[in-house]
């Protein structure tokens, strides 16, 4: 999987690429992540990537010309171009599963108020939000999507069944987990998990997952 990330702030990604699962996935070449600075596609003497909005109002708008050049420098004919915006569809596990089947994605990180609508109309194929709140830019949403897709790539998680049993894979949240010691500050691990009875353990986990989902996300049970 190749991610081409278009951003005005590539340094935001630094730590993300240098630690943990993403570092491992990069080392084993399960993913390639290219950071492309949109400012490199500006040509005026101030390298300006944004301008005042037509019609007035607060906030700046990202200019179309650098965005057009940046996107077309990496996009192939059928590459999805994903733009992160609070106006987008809410990103869900089924979207992540679908994108994880692709071989190349262009991720467009906006900043300031929005990007010029003509780029959305002509080049963006998908618009996603990561939640009903407003962030200062699309970099964190891009990292969210890269992380969620990368952990589904072959060989990245040692045991892929771990990804299949995640919260949200079956519209159900995850169950509680415990590790050693069996007793911590007087709190004991449920006996069933020490029993070695895998059928009963699976049943217990499913029951707990249902309880947690009903409590925190009853909307998922209606799906
Ligand atoms: N850009 C700003 N806020 C965002 C959000 N919630 N999701 C995706 N992109 C954004």
Image: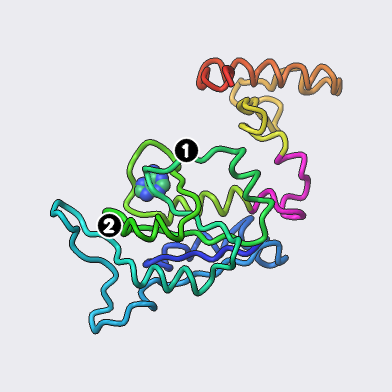
Could you say where residue 161 lies in the image, as x and y percent from the top left?
Answer: 77, 39
Q: How many marks?
A: 2
Which of the labelled discs sits on residue 192, or is there none?
none
Q: Secondary structure at mark 1?
A: strand
Residue drawn at (47%, 63%), measured in percent from left and top?
A: 13
Q: Residue 52: x and y, percent?
A: 18, 62
Snapshot quadrant of residue 179: top right
Residues in magenta, as a range: 150-163
Secondary structure predominantly adopted by residues drawn in magenta:
loop
Which residue is most to the left?
A: 56
Nearest the viewer among 107 and 169 is: 107
At x 69% / y 22%, what residue is drawn? 189
Q: Residue under circle 2?
A: 112
Spot occupied by residue 191 in the image (x, y as percentages of width and height): 75, 17
Q: Earlier in the sequence, mark 2 or mark 1?
A: 1
Task: State the SS at label 2.
Answer: loop
Residue 94 is left or right of residue 70, and the answer is right
Vertical comparison of 87 with 39: above or below: above
Q: Which residue is mark 1?
A: 90
Q: Is residue 169 above or below residue 214?
A: below
Q: Residue at x 51, y 58 (%)?
A: 81
Q: Quadrant of residue 170?
A: top right
Q: Tell which of 89 and 190 is nearer to you.
A: 89
Residue 36 located left or right of residue 104: left
At horizontal 45% and vertical 60% (from top left) the residue drawn is: 108
Q: Is 154 on the left or on the right of 113, as rendered?
A: right
Answer with left or right where residue 54 lies relative to residue 134. Answer: left
């Amino acid at each position: 999987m190749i991610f081409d990330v278009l951003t005005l702030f590539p340094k935001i990604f630094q730590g993300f690429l240098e630690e943990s699962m993403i570092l491992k996935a990069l080392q084993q070449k399960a993913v390639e992540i290219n950071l492309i600075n949109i400012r490199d596609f500006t040509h005026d003497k101030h390298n300006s990537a944004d301008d005042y909005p037509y019609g007035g109002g607060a906030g700046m708008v990202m200019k179309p010309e650098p965005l057009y050049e940046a996107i077309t420098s990496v996009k192939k004919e059928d590459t999805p171009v994903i733009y992160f915006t609070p106006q987008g569809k809410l990103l869900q596990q089924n979207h992540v599963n679908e994108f994880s089947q692709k071989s190349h994605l262009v991720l467009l990180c906006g900043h300031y108020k929005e990007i010029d609508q003509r780029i959305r109309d002509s080049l963006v194929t998908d618009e996603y939000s990561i939640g009903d709140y407003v962030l200062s830019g699309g970099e964190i949403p891009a990292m969210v999507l890269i992380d969620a897709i990368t952990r589904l790539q072959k060989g990245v998680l040692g045991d892929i069944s771990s990804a299949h049993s995640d919260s949200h894979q079956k519209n159900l949240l995850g169950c509680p987990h415990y590790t050693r010691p069996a007793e911590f500050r007087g709190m004991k691990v449920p006996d069933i998990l020490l029993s070695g009875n895998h059928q009963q353990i699976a049943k217990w986990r499913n029951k707990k997952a249902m309880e947690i989902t009903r409590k925190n996300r009853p909307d998922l049970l209606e799906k």
